[in-house]
Amino acid sequence: MQDFAESFSLAFSLVWSFDAHLMEIVWLSVRVSITAVIIALIIGFPLGAALGMTRFPGRQVIIVLVNALMGLPPVVVGLLVYIMLSNAGPFGWLRLLYSPTAMIIAQTVLITPIVTALTREIVEQLHQEYDEFFKSLCISPGQVLATLLWDARYNLITVALAGFGRAIAEVGAVIIVGGNINHLTRVMTTAIALETSKGDLALALALGIILMGLALAVNALVMGFRSTARSTAFG
Amino acid sequence: MFNSSMPNLSKYSVLSMLALLSVLVHPVRAAETIILQSTTSTANSGLYDHLLPIFKSATGISVNVVAVGTGQAIKNASNGDGDVLLVHAKAAEEEFVAAGFGVERYDVMYNDFVVVGPPEDPARIIGLDNVIEAFSQIANSFSVFVSRGDNSGTHKKEMELWSAAKVDVAAASGTWYRESGSGMGSTLNVAIGMEAYVLTDRATWISFKNKSNFRVVLEGDARLYNQYGVILVNPERHDHVNATAGKAFIEWLLSKGGQEAISAYTLNKKQLFFPNAR
């Protein structure tokens, strides 16, 4: 397949030349997905931890529901957010459709269940370990929650990365609510879809290679940071 | 087992998180911008990359193009998610105006549809000049045909041709007749992968890069005429529509300058769109 060789050299020359248009698209992809991850963490960490450390009737039902929402199809999320943000929809007055903010909202909806469900799993195990200890301390549930999250922080980094991976890779939601508008809402995945539909498979694959490189770089960066922090903390 | 450093989610970390968020989410909308709901055929051929900078330098207005199938573009415009609509399905466009969603429809330009197929030409249609006859032969020989199947302008045209050829494609769907349900470019990719015939607008075909050994097997029938129309989304229906800038764009497209800019756009030395505003 000559497409492969062509794509690799194309990817390399695009990155090497620091192509301005490419950098714009890469930066928007990163900006949108990282913002969505941060918001999803702010919502999902406390929510997941609360689910993991409490017992109440109907809890199993909520857990099943949240776990199921991990499988939300991006295109369905895109459609729901489009209907909400459309000028004919309830939040049309915000004028957010076809903006990066709309894309952030869609990705946040997509990954918050992932963060919540995985956090619940991790915190629940940790809580069982610490249960006796917390009882002996008589501390408030808020403190318990914060302590559990803090102690699980290295595992929660992987949760954040899972969310980021899902966000940066999805195309179905952002193409509907962002509209793939050049210089405004075009991100890596929508650009790949566009080039594929133009039949420029070599360029599409080159962009795919760059996107995978980007994901690799973010993961390496975070894991490097994590092991440094860990060795500082535990000596 | 218990880490001594207690969680310290201080005010500062929360504040810095919010500051980071506000940097990341800053609004991007410029003052004079309009959203153009349009088709993949016009956008993917590069026409807008040629036209819009000329329009912008003349008026300062930027045009953001959302390129989807004609059916979806009309739906989005009906929801008020756009200022101007530029598509190619005259009947649906007139319906859109009649329903009060658009102000008035103008002819802008035209090109034509072509039938593309594998060089082996299993239905023996090379040499024909009658598209209805060609479609009948495709159906009678059970040669694979890939349809957009997405209610786009091209799909509507194709359905007209099948009904003129008296072929019930709905009954054949899944056998020799296959609906891709996606855009023109993706459908061409599918057709090439399946060695199938496909109806496409000429602009997309000329600019398409994954042609393999496929070629135009039929062209030139008057029934393959492809008219594009432009409509301002009705500001009385959706009050946020930027009517002034939208009108300026439409007037420019229909003006001598806009029409000449459309003619001037070529790809591989071929003119893709022919202006015909009246």
Image (tube, coloured by chain):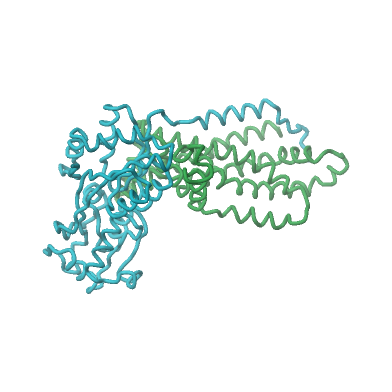
Chain colours: A green, B cyan
Residue A128 seen by the camera: yes
Q: Is residue B116 left or right of residue A176?
A: left
Query: Percent position (x, y) of residue A232?
Result: 68, 31
- Residue occupying image coordinates x 77% and y 49%: A54
Give residue A59's quadrant in the image.
bottom right
Give residue B128's quadrant in the image.
bottom left
Q: Is residue A170 left or right of residue B191?
A: right
- Residue occupying image coordinates x 39% and y 41%: B82
Query: Percent position (x, y) of residue A23?
Result: 40, 33
Residue A204 seen by the camera: no
- Quadrant containing the C terminus of chain B in the rendered view: top left
Q: Nearer the viewer, residue A7 or A122?
A: A122
Query: Percent position (x, y) of residue A228?
Result: 62, 32
Q: Nearer the viewer, residue A186 or A52?
A: A186
Q: Is residue B264 left or right of residue A97?
A: left
Give residue B15's quadrant in the image.
top right
Q: Is residue B158 left or right of residue A231?
A: left
Q: Nearer the viewer, residue B61 or A124?
A: B61
Q: In the rendered view, would you say A204 is above or below A227?
A: below
